[in-house]
Amino acid sequence: MLDKKTNILLAMAGAAVLMASSPVLAQDAAAPAAPAAASAPAAADAAAPAADAAAPAADAAATEEAAAEGHGGAGLTPIAMFMMAHPVVKVVMAGLILASIFSWTLLLIKLVEFSSLGKKTNRFLEEYRGARTLADIRRLATSEEFDGNPLADMAAAATGEVELSRQAGLDVAGVHRGSTIDRANNAIGAVQGGLGIRLSGGQQFLASVGSGGPFIGLFGTVYGIMNSFIGIAESNTTNLAVVAPGIAEALLATGIGLFAAIPAVIFYNYFNTRIASYGARADGFNAELINSISRQLDKGA
């Protein structure tokens, strides 16, 4: 009986012990989870500065990428650079392009003019040297075939002066021979003076484009580069992808200036040579014409 009671008491004591120890076991099991939960805010606090530090770099990269995309990136072409250039630089480039167009138009016109002038002059001289009298020379010089030719105009002016002197009753083959030749020579000189003005038409424009084109283009370049550096300062970046397109747009102005100036200078010198050559040819014809008139007057023509 005693043993039975003892067993019951032991069982009850063990149950009490188990009941008393269960909260402790629960707390012991939850204890490892508590430090883990407490460490989560600490990890978040540690990650926050890293995110804050990465934000400016991301913003800078986005700014550079946007700037590169705004300039066309790797797809830059002369037309694209012209369209994206600063208005002042764009005006400079447009003016130089127009000057280049006018220069090339003038070059083609003068090339055709000198080519036609040389061919017509050769034909006139060939027929002039076959004329036998002053009347033949005048008829040849005033024909429609050689209308506007400088040498034909010189011959027409000289023979016209002789004819006017004869119609005035002067003895062109005798007493007034010397004065008649002087007047004919003066008439030739007047035509030659107009010849210089006629052949030099457009030369001043070519000289202006040739001398001023590079400097006008350089002005556009300086202005464009200045704006590029201002943009660099505002964007706070020196990335080549951001800097290069703006500088390329500015340098395009100098390139266009050189494109307009180089042919203008070359053809200005070429046409000056042609004008001087034709002037020398006209001087030689002047002497030849005066000799012909003097010879015909000596023959009493």
Image (cartoon, rainbow, N blue to C red):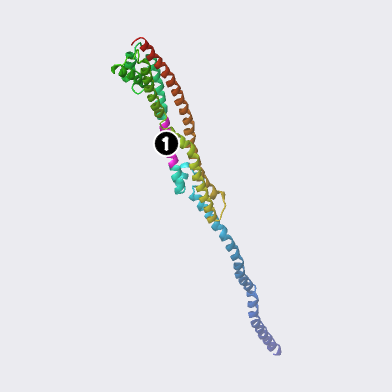
Horizontal and vertical percent position of residue 4: 68, 87
The answer to whether residue 84 is above or below residue 103 is below
Q: Which quadrant holds residue 299?
A: top left
Q: Quadrant of the C terminus?
A: top left
Of 251 and 60, which appears nearest the observer?
Answer: 251
Of 103 and 138, which appears nearest the observer?
Answer: 138
Tell me the crowding category of disc 1: few under 14, some 14 to 19, or many 20 or more residues within 10 angstroms, Cα based: few
- Furthest-bottom residue in this view: 2
- Furthest-front residue in this view: 175
Question: Which span of residues is magenta-colored?
Answer: 95-107
Q: Which residue is mark 1?
A: 101
Horizontal and vertical percent position of residue 150: 38, 23
- Furthest-right residue in this view: 3
The answer to whether residue 62 shows anywhere in this view is no
The answer to whether residue 18 is above or below residue 170 is below
Q: Amino acid at mark 1?
A: Ile
Of 187 and 74, which appears nearest the observer?
Answer: 187
Residue 254 counted in the magenta span = no
Of 9 and 290, which appears nearest the observer?
Answer: 290
Horizontal and vertical percent position of residue 111: 42, 27
Residue 105 counted in the magenta span = yes
Please indicate whether residue 224 sits to the left or right of residue 289 in the image.
right
Magenta stretch: helix, strand or loop mostly: helix
Q: Which quadrant holds residue 147?
A: top left
Badge 1 element:
helix
Residue at coordinates 56% horizontally, 49% vertically from top-left?
240
